Amino acid sequence: MKKLLPALAALLLLASCANTQTTQSGAVGVQRKQFMMLSTKQVDSMASQSYVQTLKTADGKKTLNPNPQQTERVRTIAKRLINQTKAFRPDAANWKWEVNVEGSSELNAYCMPGGKIMVYTGLMEQLNTTDDELAAVMGHEISHALREHGRERMSEAYLQKIGLLGIAAIVGISSDSRDNAATTLKIGSAVTAVALTLPHSREQEREADRMGLELAARAGFDPHAAVSLWRKMGAHAAKKPPEFLSTHPTDDSRIKELDALIPTVLPLYEAAKTRPG
Ligand SMILES: [Zn+2]
């Protein structure tokens, strides 16, 4: 019986987990029930710690915000995008958003859970990205955070690991409770590492593409730039495949889907352009 308790606890935990919708569907109509085990607070706190560490490391290497003009440019674009996040979730206005630039030749950008944004200088310099194109990448990354894709991946990873733990408990691989605690802790940090570095699923990518397109349009950035950006990425990849592309395959279907969605968000872009301020 004693050995069955962890499995029972895991089952109870699962029973209390919710299928949720993190965002409103927007004009692009993103709707999918998401399985979540960890709380937003737990995931945001892990991401926040990781971001602080990243900033510290970059600062130590003198690569944090190496060019004030670049940082200013990225922050201005981010602010316009963040102002439009209310279309998908009103609470995002109160997030502790942070936006920084890291000096690196890599073509990369990300937005950690809770709104911690990083753009690599390589993305701006190597592709000669326009503001509209930068907004396309950042809108995509911000959408991953709005949709809490990181929390979703961590929840899935936990589910798999808890399943393994439960089985281990039942077959009595480790009956020492202190061993179990240590194992749980180890699994916990492994899951965090995995969830923060593993690529998103294809479906999560599609959602971020669609929501990002709408965010950029609402913020007054030309949605056509999403297509030109991915084309540039693809052309660059032919020479030297950037890291970003290992997690963001720029296949024809991605570009086709974005292209087909432009008419849906174009009125939002036109309205934003004529809006004062
Ligand atoms: Zn993505």
Image (cartoon, grey):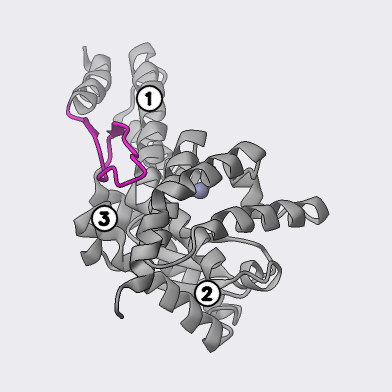
Using the image, tell me which numbered label, if any, was put on residue 87: 3
Which residue is at 29% across, 31% downward? 33
Which residue is at 20% across, 58% downward? 91
Q: Nearer the viewer, mark 3 or mark 2?
A: 3
The residue at label 2 has a CB less than 8 Å from ligand 1: no
Q: Secondary structure at mark 1?
A: helix
| Image coords of residue 70 (percent x, y) | 55, 81
Seen from the viewer's position, the closer of residues 19 and 8 is 19
Quarter where residue 159 is shown: top left
Q: Name the amino acid, label 1.
A: Leu
Q: In the displayed structure, does residue 229 sit left or right of residue 55?
A: right
Q: Quadrant of the C terminus?
A: bottom left
Q: Label 2 belongs to which residue?
A: 101
Q: In the displayed structure, does residue 36 sit left or right of residue 104?
A: left
- Separation of disc 1 and disc 3 at Cα? 40 Å
Seen from the viewer's position, the closer of residues 250 and 17 is 250
Which residue is at 53% across, 40% downward? 257
- Which is the main secondary structure of the residues drawn in magenta? loop
- Regarding residue 214, the answer to whether it shows in the image is yes
Q: What residue span does the magenta drawing correspond to?
A: 16-38
Label 3 vs 2, first from the N-terminus: 3
Q: Name the amino acid, label 2.
A: Val
Q: Label 1 belongs to which residue?
A: 165
